[in-house]
Amino acid sequence: MSSDSVAPASRADSPLRTLITGAQMLFVAFGALVLVPLLTGLDPSVALFTAGVGTLVFHGVTRRSVPVFLASSFAFIAPIQGSVTNFGIPATLGGLFAAGLVYVVISQFVRLKGTGWLHRLLPPVVVGPVIMVIGLALAPVAVDMATGETSEAIGYGQAIVLSMASLLVTLLLAVFGRGLLRLVPILGGILVGYSLALVMGVVDLGAVHQAAWFEIPSFVAPSFHLSAILFMLPVAIAPAVEHIGDMIAIGSVTRRDYLVKPGLHRTLLGDGLATSTAALFGGPPNTTYSEVTGAVTLTRNFDPRVMIVAAFVAILLAFVAKLGALLQSIPAPVMGGIMTLLFGSIAVVGMNTLVRAGQALTAPRNLVIVSLILVFGIGGMQIGGGQFALQGVSLSAVVGILLNLVLPAAEEEAAP
């Protein structure tokens, strides 16, 4: 590798090149960026706006030192879907605002105490199965969308064709794609599935024709309800832990230690403030984005200014109302096919967390923790009621943390 490949501004030394490269970064993140709002009932135009604003907030906190673009973690999809169903969108946004504050609190503990306490509080035996619950808890929703159960105008046969075509293209690009194509499997699956839906005549373009070219996005203010907040707060734990891995990954590419400079406490703070800011406007939470890490690896462009340009482009696109209407016209089976892979892949990430830890899962302590997290989270266990109900991912995370703190460590675990 040549030395110029790691110079921060070597690939973005002119305003025009910076603009083009920034637009390319947004293109790489675009499919996954709009997937979260489309699957959770939020407005994709608002999501574009809040992703741009959140990225600017992050770079303000980290002093433009980390080349990342922010958008929503897939780990939030299932919890947001569940929260919207139970509490509505405004209350869900209030819960997401509170989840952003969890990042803020963790960042300050990291600043004062380092990261050792975080690993003790959230070891792999807790984090792994919680991530698995996030992926599998709403797997039936993905199947219902893929088979047309949620679409009155699309029959089972058409739905299966659309969902399986979208899924096939997505997995082919993910496994066999090269270069830029490998970074956009979700976008590729959506484009092919949508094109097929147009040919089959199952796309309603009425809203697209009626939409103005330019319009202020439909911002939604959050409302704050304790039950929705309690439901969402523990969900922030898994993405917060994953954030450390994201910073290490991007640092290994750029050959810089972002855990030291600007510091993990600053990057966590940036994520938290960006998430809370997004919730104030009606957007999904903002976290560091693995697709952009892949794009940085491929293009060798390590200039944070490129991500700031991508943020401004996202904000501008948010005001193109026809684009938002077009995104909302994507048939549910197209998204359902991609979700079947997406939710499964999240579960595999959790499984891999357990495997890498190298601990015996049949040891009584680990068996108890993992078993109860999985059954409580996937089975729909609920404790309490009304404003004080804990269920799903939230309950499983709390149960895992408490069991990890209360149960004595096995002798082999206590040994160095």
Image (cartoon, helix red, strand yellow):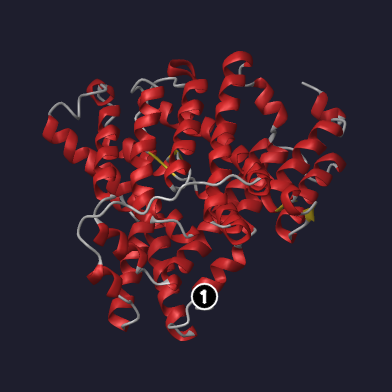
In which quarter of the view is residue 303 placed? top left
In which quarter of the view is residue 302 placed? top left
Q: Is residue 334 above or below residue 294?
A: below
Location of residue 371 in the rendering, given as x and y in whole percent from the top left corner: 79, 50
Location of residue 399 in the rendering, given as x and y in whole percent from the top left corner: 78, 43
Location of residue 350 in the rendering, given as x and y in whole percent from the top left corner: 62, 46
**Side (left or right) of 357 relative to 338:** right
Q: Amino acid at mark 1?
A: Thr
Location of residue 19 in the rendering, given as x and y in whole percent from the top left corner: 17, 37
Q: Is residue 11 above or below residue 148?
A: above
Give the residue drawn at x 22%, y 22%.
Answer: 4
The residue identified by callout 1 is 150
From where the camera sits, is residue 106 visible? yes
Q: Is residue 299 above or below residue 76?
A: above
Q: Quadrant of the C terminus?
A: top right
Give the residue drawn at x 21%, y 38%.
Answer: 21
129 and 1: which one is in front? 129
**Side (left or right) of 114 relative to 358:** left
**Side (left or right) of 248 relative to 315:** right
243 and 128: which one is in front? 243
Q: Secondary structure at mark 1?
A: loop
Q: Is residue 189 above or below residue 59?
A: below
Q: Quadrant of the N terminus?
A: top left
129 and 30: which one is in front? 30
Give the residue drawn at x 63%, y 47%.
Answer: 225
Considering every residue shown, the one lying at the far top of the view is 112
